[in-house]
């Protein structure tokens, strides 16, 4: 029979409650009073406080010499800075940076993600700006699949994040390991606003990704040739209405590029069913 799970130790419980007084009291307890399992959990108190955005407690734990570069195996080896960036807790991230400098902004051992990559995916622009101000080369990092911050921003769909990264020098047509650009990642993730933003910012829709060895033969396409942006939008044989909408936009944009080189990309139109729903609601939703 397995033993019942132990409850949180006093420090972890206080962190969860955001109770600064209880945290201070728990820190005064001698370590010998803690059960071994509880003592192990207490090591994650700073990670938990950063995840929850409890700034005062983070500062208290830093002052008590808690290790700020500890990682949490249950969440894929994330560090406190990664948790803060994911949650958009800019003040907590700033406290960690003030204590550790740029050292807390790199990928922890055994994890390919960095705080910037996490912030980019989650659309946490204030955190991303802080990271870029602290470590100018942070945007050069990539995950295990070769996806940089701009690729993940496009995947997450945050226009503000895409704009920030391009403004800070991210190469808009850089590719991940499989040859996909940020525009391609936005298309695959069904992020219309990100597709439109990348087009407006100068993305190129013509590069092709690296073909899969098992890619099927497609009529009208050179076998062994990678997909470009339009191929990715039409790869489901028009069964996906959102991709169908994106494909229509891409065709119009590519035609405009051909007819008028240098012309700005057209704005991404809203999904028709969304426009219809908004108009219906604006008209009173069919009510009397």
Image (spheres, rainbow, N blue to C red):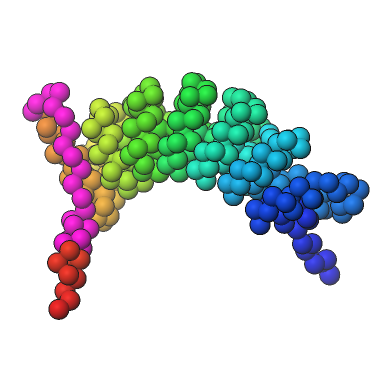
Q: Is residue 145 magenta?
A: no
Identify the residue at horizontal 76%, vertical 35% (top origin): 65
- The image quadrant of residue 216 is top left
The picture places residue 61, in percent across and down from the top left corner, at 72, 40
Identify the residue at horizontal 17%, vertical 76% (top origin): 287
Task: Indicate left or right for 194 with 145 as reference.
Answer: left
In which quadrant is the C terminus drawn? bottom left
In which quadrant is the N terminus drawn? bottom right
Residue 272, can we see it?
A: yes
Identify the residue at horizontal 36%, vertical 46% (top origin): 189
- The image quadrant of residue 105 is top right
Work out which residue is located at the far left of the displayed protein and give it.
Answer: 259
Q: Is residue 267 magenta?
A: yes
The picture places residue 205, in percent across and down from the top left corner, at 25, 32
The picture places residue 257, in percent across and down from the top left corner, at 14, 29
- The image quadrant of residue 183 is top left
Residue 112, can we see it?
A: no
- Above or below, comparing residue 205 to residue 42 in the picture: above
Task: Indicate left or right for 43 with 140 as reference.
Answer: right
The residue lying toward the viewer, choosing from 139 and 53, is 53
Magenta residues?
259-279
The picture places residue 59, in percent across and down from the top left corner, at 66, 39
Identify the residue at horizontal 62%, vertical 33% (top origin): 96
């Amino acid at each position: 029979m397995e033993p019942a799970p132990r409850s949180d130790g006093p420090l972890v419980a206080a962190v969860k409650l955001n109770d600064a007084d209880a945290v201070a009291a728990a820190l005064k307890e001698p370590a010998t009073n803690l059960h071994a399992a509880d003592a192990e959990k207490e090591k994650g108190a700073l990670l938990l406080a950063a995840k929850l955005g409890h700034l005062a407690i983070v500062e208290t734990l830093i002052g008590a010499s808690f290790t700020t570069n500890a990682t949490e195996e249950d969440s894929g080896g994330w560090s406190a800075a990664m948790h803060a960036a994911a949650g958009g807790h800019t003040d907590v991230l700033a406290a960690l940076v003030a204590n550790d400098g740029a050292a807390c902004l790199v990928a922890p051992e055994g994890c390919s993600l960095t705080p910037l990559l996490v912030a980019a995916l989650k659309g946490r622009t204030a955190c991303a700006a802080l990271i870029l101000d602290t470590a100018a080369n942070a945007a050069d990092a990539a995950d295990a699949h070769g996806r940089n911050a701009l690729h993940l921003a496009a995947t997450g769909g945050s226009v503000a994040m895409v704009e920030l990264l391009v403004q800070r020098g991210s190469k808009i047509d850089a590719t991940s390991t499989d040859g996909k650009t940020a525009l391609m990642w936005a298309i695959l993730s069904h992020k219309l606003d990100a597709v439109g933003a990348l087009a407006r910012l100068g993305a190129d829709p013509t590069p092709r990704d690296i073909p899969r060895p098992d890619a099927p033969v497609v009529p009208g396409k050179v076998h062994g040739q990678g997909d470009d942006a339009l191929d990715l939008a039409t790869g489901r044989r028009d069964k996906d209405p959102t991709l169908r909408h994106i494909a229509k936009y891409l065709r119009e944009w590519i035609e405009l590029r051909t007819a008028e080189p240098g012309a700005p990309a057209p704005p991404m139109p809203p999904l028709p069913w969304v426009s219809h729903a908004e108009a219906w609601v604006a008209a009173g939703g069919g009510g009397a």
